[in-house]
Amino acid sequence: MKKENGAITVITLVTMLFMLAFLLSTYTIITNRRQAQAELKEEMRKTYETEVDNVEEIYNDYVAKAQEIKNNSMAAVIAGERAKVTSRYTDSKGKTAIIPEGFTVSGVSGENTIENGLVVYVIPEGETVDWSNSADVEKAKEEYDQFVWIPIKNTSDNNATHTGDINDMYICQNKGTGDYGTGACQITVIDGQATCTAHGDCTQMAGRLYASNTSLDTFKIKFTETYTPNSGLREPSVTSTSYDGNVEYLDQMNNILGTKFANIEDFKGYLQDEYNKIVASVYTNGGYYVGRYETSNMSNSGTKDTTVRVVAGTTTGINNVTWYRMYGEQVNYAKNKELNDSIGSTMIQGTAYDQEVLFANTESYNIKQVGEIEHNFREPYNTGSQSTDLSKNIYDLEGNMRVWTTEHVYTDNRMARGGSFGWSASACSRDSLAPSNAPVYYGSQLMLYVK
C-alpha cells in the first residue's frame, strides 16, 4: 500500500509539474499576445492621430487655397472708384481690404491706405464727388456715410501677443472650461462656421477683452481670457431679466428689427448667433469696418424706418437713447440703407472697439493717456469737428459721447467706452455705470461686416 501511495504521489507530482509548465507557457503566450496587442493599438493610435493631423492640415490648406483663389478672382477697385460688386482694394503699399458692393473708396490723399485708415463712402449710384476739390470733399463728409477699415489677420498665433490677429480679438467659450485648458484658441472657419480647433472644435464664440475689469490700468495688461456668461467682463451676454427680459425693452427691439423676442433667452440666442457670424466674417475677410464718426440720427422712439447716419457736422440723435433702441437701429442700418445682402451692421462690439483703438494708437495719439486731449464743452459738439480727437481717420474716440458697446459688466450694465464732453478721458477707458435702459449721455458707433 505504501508503494502504491508513493507511486500515486510521484505521478501526481509529475502531472502537477506538467500542468504548471503548461500554464506558465500559456500565460507567457497570453502576456506576449496582450503586449503585442497593446503595441499594435499604440501604433494604430499614433497612426490615427497622424492621419487626423494630416487631414486637418490638408483641409486647412485647402480652405486657405480656396480663399486665395476667391480673393484673386475678386474684382478690383481703385481709389476714388465705386465698387460695382464686392471687390478687393490694394493700396500703394500692397495692403488689401474688402470693399463691399456700392461702397466708394476715398479719392482723398491720406484716406486711401490701410495703414493710415482706409475710408469708404456710401455714395448712391449716379452721384459723384470731385476728390480734387476740397469744398466738394467737405460737403461729402456731411452728406455721405463713412467707414474706416480695421485690418485683422486670419492667421493663428499660439502666443496671441500682438495686435491684429483673429485670436487676439476672439476666444471660444470652451477655453478654460471642463476638460479644456487655458491655452490659446485656434480660430478658423469650417463649413461657414467660426470654429476653435484647439478646444474641441467649439463653435460658440466670445470676445477676448483687453481688460479684466473696468480699470484703465489693466488695458492690454490683463485680459479676459475665459468666457463667463453671467458675471464679470464678457460678451456676448445679457443683463438681468429686469432689463433684457423686460417686455418693454424687448418690444423696443422687436418694433425696429421685426423680431419676436418673447423672453430673455430669445434675445440671448440672437446675440450669440450674430456674434458667431461676425467672427466668421472677420476671419474670412481679414477685417471689419467702424463708423468714422459716432452714430447720429438715432431716435428714442425709433421704428423699422429709422435710418441712422455716420456723417460729420451734427449733434442730432447721437445720445439720450436707450441701449435697446441704439442696438436695434444700428443692426437695421444695412437694411434701411438698402445695402446689398452681403453687408451686416450692428452696434460695435467691445472687442472690436479694443482693436480699433489699438489700431488708432500712435506716438502722437496715445489711447491710454488720460488728459492728453482737453474737450471742455458743456454740450455735445458736432461729430468730426475736433481735429485733436482724430487718429487713423477715425473721429470722436475720446471727447464727445462715451460709446455704448455690446460688452457687459456686473449684472445690469453694458460697457460704455472712450470719453465724453466736459472732461478728458482716454479712448480705451471703460465706464461701467451705464444701465441698459438709461437714455443719458451715451452714444455709439456702427460696425459693418461682410457676410
Image (tube, grey):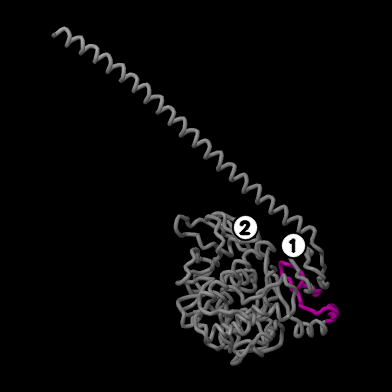
For label 2, the SS is strand
Dominant SS of magenta comes to loop
* Residue 388 in sight in this render: no
Q: Is 74 rendered above or below residue 257? A: above
Which residue occupies 69% across, 86% down? 305
Picture quarter containing residue 206? bottom right
Location of residue 311 in the rendering, given as x and y in whole percent from the top left corner: 72, 83
Q: Nearer the viewer, residue 425 or 15?
A: 15
Task: Name the mark on residue 50.
Answer: none
What's the residue type where badge 1 is placed? Lys
Where residue 28 appears, x then y in whole percent?
Answer: 38, 24
Quadrant for the C terminus in the image = bottom right
Left or right: 46 in relation to 22:
right
199 sits left or right of 54 in the view: left
Q: Tell me what residue is drawn at x 45 percent, y 77 percent.
A: 411
Q: Nearer the viewer, residue 352 or 237?
A: 237
Residue 279 shown left or right of residue 175 in the figure: right
Q: Secondary structure at mark 1?
A: loop
Q: Which residue is mark 2?
A: 188
Q: Earlier in the sequence, mark 2 or mark 1?
A: 1
The range drawn in magenta is 106-133
Q: Nearer the viewer, residue 260 or 11?
A: 11
Report the residue marked by disc 1.
95
In the displayed image of the protein, which residue is found farthest to the top? 3
Say what amino acid the circle numbered 2 marks.
Thr
Category of crowding for the residue at label 2, using alpha-carbon neighbours closer than 10 angstroms: few (below 14), some (14–19), many (at least 20): many
